[in-house]
Structures are given as structure tokens and as C-alpha cells.
Image (tube, rainbow, N blue to C red):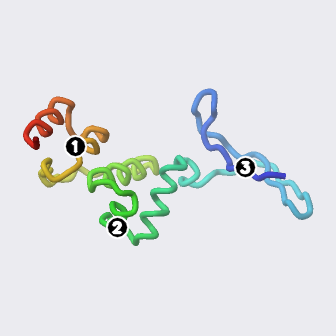
Amino acid sequence: MKNHKVISKCPICNGDMEVKVLQCDHCNTKIEGSFRLSKFDYLTDAQLFFVELFLKNKGSIKAVEKDLNVSYPTVKKYLDDVIISLGYQIEDQVEEPINRDSLDVYDLLKNKLISLEEAVEILKKNK
């Protein structure tokens, strides 16, 4: 019998799912009740992959940038998404000004860090 990942969100209404039965594969003992999933069970596969990679790299954003071949703002966005998905708030931070000439314009645009108009301007300046 193939084991499947427990789904945490209802495919119909997107509400949280709840585990009701646990069963031993060895002796078939069943325990019924209401069991909660961990916060991590509610992360998407992509978010779990990012968390694993982040931990493997001991929290080094630079190392994650290298492994994923993405820019610093992209890694920060992934990290912020995970933090929010785990139920935490992102504290208002004073962001360092983005040196847009040194970053990948596509990453900035994709992650909604700049507008389409700003991307066009940057590309015109870099010709």
C-alpha cells in the first residue's frame, strides 16, 4: 500500500483538514479521535523544500541564493512567505535601498518588488 502525504487543506473549500484516525501498519491497531497537524503540515511542498534548504545552509541567505540561483530579494520573499504561512507576522523593517542595477530585473518584477514601468526604465538604462 502506497503512503500518501496528509493533505492539510480541503480541496473543496480550502479549510483546514483534521486527522481523525491513526492506524498501526504492523498490528492494525486503530485510534480514533481528533488529532492536530503541525504548522509545517500546512506549508506547500515548495515552502517545505525552501525550509529544508534554508536549514541545510544554516540560515545563510547567501548560500540559499547560490543553491537556488536566485537573488537576495527572492530568497527574502520566500522566507517571508514561510514565516507568514507559519502564522507569524513580519515585523516592519527598514529595508535597505535596493540597488536595482545589480539585481535581476525579472526577479524583482516577478516578486512584485518593482512595477512593470520601473522594470522597463531599468532595462532602458542598462542598454
The residue carrying mark 3 is 4
Specify the label residue 105 is tagged with. 1
Residue farthest top in this picture: 12
Q: Whole-Å distance between the Cαs marked 1 and 3?
A: 39 Å
The residue carrying mark 2 is 63
Q: Which is more foreground, mark 1 or mark 3?
A: 1
Query: Residue at point 59% right, 28% down?
Result: 13
Q: Is residue 69 above or below residue 55?
A: above
User: What's the amino acid at mark 2?
Assistant: Ala
Expressed as whole percent of the image width and height from the top left, the position of residue 28 reads 91, 58
Callout count: 3
Q: Are marks 1 and 3 in contact (CB under 8 Å)?
A: no
User: What's the amino acid at mark 3?
Assistant: His
**Helix, strand or loop at disc 3?**
loop
Query: Residue at point 23% right, 41% down?
Result: 113
**Helix, strand or loop at disc 2?**
helix
Residue 28 left/right relative to 7: right
